[in-house]
Structure formats: structure tokens, C-alpha cells
Image (cartoon, rainbow, N blue to C red):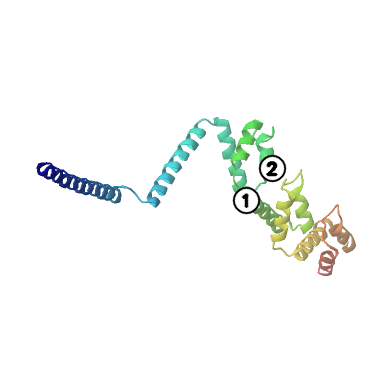
Amino acid sequence: MKKFFKMGCFGFIGLIVLIIIIGVATSGGDNGEQTANDNNEPVSGEVSDDKAAVENEESKKEDTKEEDNVPSEYKSALKKAEAYATTMDMSKNAIFAQLTSENGEKFAAEAAEYAMSKLEHDWKANALKKAESYSDTMQMSKQAIYDQLISENGEKFTEAEAQYAIDNLKADFKENALAKAKSYQETMSMSPEAIRDQLTSEHGEKFTQEEADYAIENLDK
């Protein structure tokens, strides 16, 4: 019985030692793993930035690949459209018409449609520039400018684009009416009353009555 007790005690002590060793080893492994994570793994922000960079690069490659597959005629149509928009302040509809016109660029409709779908531009700004040009160089009335901007035989802007232009146009329409009146007087020798009628006519200059009266009052006597 005494011998058996000693062997049991040894076994019990050995079991305790074994448990301690395993615990230390496990603890060390956890610490080592944690240290590795702390030293090597990127923080969440770095992961997000890297992912965004990769996605951006992939997007660029896809855009380049897509552009490589675009026919040359389509690319040429887009370049022409950009030139008309930036140098001549044309409307979207006017550019499309010019691209496809037999008296214009003669592009296929598909090429023109591609160009307009890719062209990004501020059409309201173009409408305003056209309105300023009509006022400064042709001394047109507010209503006449608006009608010219939306006309199918004119600039072909949308009503919203034309209204934006008129709302933001800084012009002295009384002075425009006077300039027109002087032109009629000097080049066509018209009477003041005939000039007044022409200035206010819906088929003429479309100035308001007040603007026309100002012009007649300030004509050379």
C-alpha cells in the first residue's frame, strides 16, 4: 500500500507539471501570434486605402480597354463635339445636328450619339454666352434673344437653358432699343413712329413699350 501511494503522488505531481508546461506554451504561442499581428497586419484604414487604390486601378484599366474598342469615327465625332461646345458655345442639339448634317460634318448618327453621350458640358453656361453675344453685338431685345436661343432654326437650347441665360444676362435693354432705333433712322431713314412700331413688333425687335419709348425720346432730332 505504501509503494502504491508513492507512485500515485509522483503521477499527480507530474500531471501538475505537465499542465503548467502546456499553459506556458499556450500563453507564449498566443503572445507570439498577437505580436505577429501587431507587427505585420495593416490597420483597417490601410486596408481600405489599399482596396480603393486597387479598385481605382482596375477601373482605369477597364476604361482604357473600353476606349481601345471604340471606332475611330466615334472618337473623331467626340473631338468635334468638344470643339463646338468649347469654342462656339453651341447647344447640345445644335452640335448633334451639325455632326450629322450633310452640309456639316456628315458623321453617322451612331457616331454622333456616342459623342453626345460622352460629352460633359455646362449647356446653361453656353446659352448665357450666346445671349451675351446677341445683346452685345446685335443689340437684341430680351424676348428676341430668348426666342433665338430656343428656335429650331436658331440655337436649339432647351427652354430651361434659355431661361437661365435670360435670368443671368446683364444687359441694358433700353440702350439696346436705342441702338436699334438709331440704326433704323440712319440706314433706312424711317420715321420715329415707324421705328417705334418696328421696335415693339412681334415680327420685329420685340422690345417692350417702355424700352421703345426710351429709344424714340433719345433719337437724334
Q: Which mark is residue 94?
A: 2
Instruction: Indicate left or right for 27 with 52 as reference.
Output: left
Q: Whole-percent x and y of residue 198?
A: 86, 57
Between disc 1 and disc 2, whose residue precedes? 2
- Residue 15 in view, yes or no: yes
Q: Secondary structure at mark 1?
A: loop
Task: Give, as a three-letter code, the residue at label 1.
Answer: Asp
Quarter containing the N terminus: top left
Task: Give above or below for 107 relative to 152.
Answer: above
Which dot, 1 or 2, sits closer to the camera?
1
Task: Give above or below for 212 relative to 81.
Answer: below
Instruction: Indicate left or right for 56 with 37 as reference.
Output: right
Query: Mark 1 near mark 2, Cβ–Cβ under 8 Å?
Result: no
Q: Secondary structure at mark 2?
A: helix
Q: Whole-percent x and y of residue 55?
A: 45, 42
Instruction: Indicate left or right for 201 with 51 as reference.
Output: right
Quarter containing the C terminus: bottom right
Q: Which residue is mark 1?
A: 122
The 10 Å Cα crowd at callout 1, few under 14, some 14 to 19, many 20 or more, is some
Q: Which mark is residue 48?
A: none
User: What residue is rendered at 67% in x and 39% in y?
Assistant: 96
| Residue at mark 1 to residue at mark 2: CA–CA distance | 14 Å
User: What residue is rendered at 45% in x and 43% in y?
Assistant: 56
- Residue 141 in view, yes or no: no
Q: Whole-percent x and y of residue 22?
A: 21, 45
Front-most of 79 and 120? 120
How many numbered marks does the figure carry? 2
Task: Give, as a three-letter code, the residue at label 2.
Answer: Ala
